[in-house]
Each structure stands twice: as structure tokens, then as C-alpha cells.
């Protein structure tokens, strides 16, 4: 490796470390509070909440009504300055379904942005369950007596 390549690598590693540190601060200080408050709220509707994946630069949160009806919301770095929030749904008789995806600048994300991501994912779960229920009703045979 040339001297320039070594120096460039060192600078990129430093930038990556700074971004990861900034993301971890957001995850711990802002997002964890939003998740805790929302978990308490949805518990009244019998949601089970958990954090199935927690590693540096990535955090997942699960909100489950049943074993087959849930949403997993994942926050991760996409680049040095972009945080991505993605949701994935588990639906009865439909399996896993991709959900929403939103992104923001790492330097401006805050608790409100995290709350909005969680709320959109939960709203999406209810909408998808309603759609499934509507489809199921149109396929059910009608008994004529």
C-alpha cells in the first residue's frame, strides 16, 4: 500500500468511527427513550416488544401482537452521514413482507424522528392486517340457508 493509500485509509476509518459513535449516541440517548415510551403504550394492546438485534451500527426493535403478526423496525448506518430506518412485517398466512424505508442525515436525527419511524411502522402493521382481513372476508364462502 502506498503512503497516500495508508493515510486515506486512516482518515476513512476515523470518519467511519465518528459516524458509528454518533449513531450509537442517537440509539442510546434518543431512540431508546422513544422505544421505551412506545413499548409502554402498546403493551395495553397486548403487544410484546423486544430488541432482537443490537450490534454496533445497527439496532432492531420488534413489536409483536402474536408470533405471526409483528413488525421489526431496524435502524442502521447507510453511509457516513445517513441513517436508514426499515420495517419488515410478519403477517399470518402471508409470511414476511417488506415495509417502509426512510432515511435522514445522521447529524439531525432525534427522538422525534425515531418516534415517527416507529409510529409509521406500527400504522403499517395495522393497515396490512386490515388488508389481509378484508381479502380473507371476500374469499370466504357465503352460507345460504
Image (tube, rainbow, N blue to C red):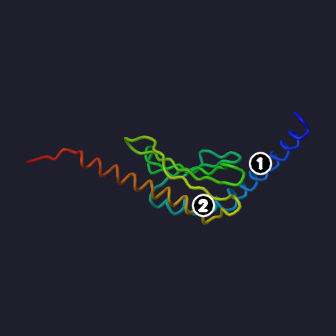
Mark identifier at residue 109: none
Residue with the most extreme bottom position = 112
Seen as rendered, the residue at the extreme top is 1
Q: Quadrant of the N terminus?
A: top right
State left or right for residue 1 relative to residue 58.
right
Vertical comparison of 106 with 5: above or below = below
Q: Which residue is mark 2?
A: 114
Residue 16 marker = 1
Say whether residue 145 is left or right of residue 48. Answer: left
Question: Mark 2 or mark 1: which comes first in sequence?
Answer: 1
Camera-side residue: 92 or 7? 7
Where is residue 135? Give x, y as percent: 29, 48
Element marked by disc 1:
helix
SS at badge 2: helix
Q: Examine the image and state in which quarter residue 22 appears.
A: bottom right
Give the x, y percent position of residue 8. Answer: 84, 44
At a point 47% along the width and 47% down the height, the residue shown is 89
Please state the horizontal and vertical placement of residue 103, each as a whole percent of the image: 60, 56
The answer to whether residue 50 is left or right of residue 139 is right
- Give the percent coordinates (x, y) of residue 102: 56, 55
Amino acid at each position: 500500500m502506498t503512503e497516500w493509500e495508508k493515510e486515506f485509509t486512516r482518515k476513512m476509518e476515523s470518519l467511519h468511527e465518528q459516524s458509528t459513535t454518533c449513531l450509537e449516541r442517537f440509539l442510546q440517548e434518543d431512540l431508546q427513550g422513544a422505544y421505551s415510551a412506545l413499548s409502554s403504550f402498546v403493551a395495553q394492546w397486548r403487544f410484546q416488544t423486544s430488541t432482537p438485534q443490537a450490534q454496533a451500527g445497527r439496532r432492531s426493535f420488534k413489536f409483536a401482537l402474536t408470533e405471526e403478526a409483528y413488525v421489526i423496525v431496524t435502524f442502521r448506518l447507510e453511509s457516513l452521514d445517513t441513517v436508514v430506518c426499515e420495517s419488515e412485517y410478519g403477517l399470518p398466512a402471508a409470511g414476511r413482507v417488506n415495509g417502509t424505508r426512510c432515511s435522514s442525515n445522521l447529524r439531525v436525527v432525534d427522538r422525534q424522528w425515531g418516534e415517527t419511524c416507529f409510529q409509521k411502522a406500527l400504522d403499517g402493521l395495522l393497515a396490512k392486517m386490515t388488508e389481509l382481513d378484508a381479502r380473507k372476508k371476500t374469499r370466504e364462502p357465503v352460507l345460504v340457508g
